[in-house]
Every structure is written in structure tokens, then in C-alpha cells.
Amino acid sequence: AQKITQTQPGMFVQEKEAVTLDCTYDTSDQSYGLFWYKQPSSGEMIFLIYQGSYDEQNATEGRYSLNFQKARKSANLVISASQLGDSAMYFCAMRELHTSGTYKYIFGTGTRLKVLA
Amino acid sequence: KAGVTQTPRYLIKTRGQQVTLSCSPISGHRSVSWYQQTPGQGLQFLFEYFSETQRNKGNFPGRFSGRQFSNSRSEMNVSTLELGDSALYLCASSLDGLAPSGEQYFGPGTRLTVT
């Protein structure tokens, strides 16, 4: 079963507008972490934002915020005031406890965002 | 602080050959994970090393192996290359990977093409 689901393969947004990238997850753990990464065409994965399962407030990092709805198991990324440089692939990831007793990352399939001038 | 470095950045190999990829984590980071990224399968976890020991392993055949050295640098090896091994191989480091909040920092990747 898919543990991280990103239902939007591609998105367009006008420069300076806000955009929401969807992510839902599935876990039976109580303690887990949710992350968003950005992958430009160069290939490098860039860490954007983190939300812990016990965090009561939504995480924010500059123009990025994470809309965390625990009951719905969703962790959407909101990018405010989009810039041309935001055009990239965005991955949602979850870090959950593995059977080895350590944590393991699981990534979604990604959403390709294109910012239009 | 220097980021994660991976060498080489690009590699072309022939079917049946073997290849070794290298990753140097951020200074002080002890956990190194490897991922394979392909258009069809997305980002798939290969394995994680911590303090020279493999701590986690994904669902890849035994042709894929790795190791970590005492300075936390890691190598992964793929033997008997197949066309399907063509992919971007990403290495990621984190402090110790023992908490859900342990974000990983990725290197630029090695793009492997098997012909």
C-alpha cells in the first residue's frame, strides 16, 4: 500500500501567487516526521520543511508552510508568493519507525511545479 | 560547512560491468543513506549505514552493496550491471537518524547510464 500519496503529478502557478501541493500519508505509528524536499532540474534534493507528529503548530520556513491535519493524515505544502526559481519537483516524505528499530524515509512520487511569469 | 559530495557526477558503463559510487557526508554526520531515483519507480531506498554498519536495507537484489568507513564516507557498489540500473543515485546524510525529526541532506547525485 502506498504510504505517501501525492495526487498532483503537475501544477502550474502564476508568479507571486500562492500554491498548495497535496500530500497524504498512511502510518500506524504515533511518532513520525513529515518532510518536504525540492528537486530542481540539477537533481539535488533540497530540504524545505519538517513537521513532527506531535507538533501542535504548523511548521513554517520563510515562504514555505506545512498545513498539517493529523486526523486527515495530510501534510500539504504551501508556497506563498511563488517565484520563477520555485519551478522544480517537490517530494513529500515520511520518516517512520522501521522494524530494525531505527527510522526510515518513505518518499512520494512527487509533484512537478511550474511557475509562470 | 561543506555539503554532501558525491563522485563521480556522471558515469557510463556497459552491461555486465560493475561500478562504485562514493559519498562524503556533511562533517559530523554519521548516518548515510543511498537512494535510487528513476522516472518509473521514483525514489527508492537502497540502504543506510551508521558507524560502519548497515542499519537499514531496502528491497534491492544482492548486486547492490555498500559500506561505510570510519570517517563516515560511504561507497556503494553495483555488480553485473543491467540496463535497468540506469538511474540517479542519491546519497543523503544525517546526524544519527535516531529520531523522526532527523532531516537528511542530499548530495547532487551520480547519474549512471548503463548501455
Image (cartoon, coloured by chain):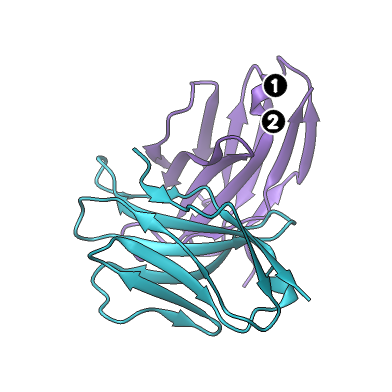
Q: Is residue B14 left or right of residue A11?
A: right
Q: Residue at x 42, y 74 (%)?
A: A66
Residue B37: x and y in percent read 60, 41
Proximity of marks 2 and 1: CB atoms separated by less than 8 Å: yes
Q: Nearer the viewer, residue A16 or B88?
A: A16
Q: Nearer the viewer, residue A79 or B24?
A: A79
Q: The residue marked by circle 2 belongs to what chain?
A: B
Residue A92: x and y in percent read 47, 58
Mark 1, Cα crowd under 10 Å, few <14 / some 14-19 / many 20+, is few
Residue type at the position of mark 1: Leu
Q: Nearer the viewer, residue A95 or A27?
A: A27
Quadrant of residue B64 within the rendered picture:
top right
Q: Which residue corresponds to mark 1?
A: B83
Residue type at the position of mark 2: Ser
Label 2, secondary structure: give it. Answer: loop
Image quadrant holding the N terminus of chain B, namely bottom right
Q: Residue at x 78, y 36 (%)?
A: B11
Colour assignment, chain A: cyan
Q: Which residue corresponds to mark 2?
A: B86
Q: CA distance from mark 2 to mark 1?
A: 6 Å
- What letter labels the chain drawn in purple? B
